[in-house]
Amino acid sequence: MGLGGALERWWPSYVLQWRQSEAFHGKADRTRNHWGWCATEVGQDAIWADFDASQSAAIAQMLADGIDPNDVGPPPGFKVKWPRFSTEIAA
């Protein structure tokens, strides 16, 4: 009703979280202190490794659920070119 009668695809919450994280942190400069005080306590590399692992796990879950990450698209208001994601399952 709010979309003028048009259907909109529904995504599970983990897909929406992946998309938001990708939009916010995907193009971040990993050489600068992006995470504030947490980077000092835990270490910048450890935080980025955790971020990459969670993003990869979300893509693996999408593929297992039959969702192509390239069909999800960017969040509303995202102005930069949205990347293409590999749909090959890592062995």
Image (spheres, rainbow, N blue to C red):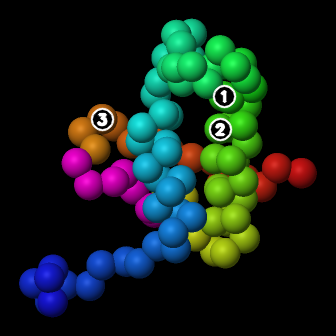
The structure residue drawn at horizontal position 47% and vertical position 53%, both measured from the top left corner, is: 19
The structure residue drawn at horizontal position 46% and vertical position 28%, both measured from the top left corner, is: 27
Query: Mark 3 packing: few (<14 Cα in 10 Å), some, or many (20+)?
Result: few
Q: Is residue 74 magenta?
A: yes
Comparing 28 with 39, the one in front is 39
Relative placement, left or right, of 27 versus 77 is right
**Which residues fall within the magenta stretch?**
71-77
Comparing 38 with 10, the one in front is 38
Q: Which mark is residue 51?
A: 2
The answer, for residue 47, to whether it is visible in the render is: yes
Q: Which mark is residue 80?
A: 3
Amino acid carrying label 3: it is Val
Amino acid carrying label 2: it is Phe
Q: Nearer the viewer, mark 3 or mark 2?
A: 2
Viewport quadrant of the N terminus: bottom left
Residue 79 is situated, as x and y percent measured from the top left of the image, at: 24, 39
The structure residue drawn at horizontal position 65% and vertical position 57%, both measured from the top left corner, is: 58
Q: Secondary structure at mark 2?
A: helix
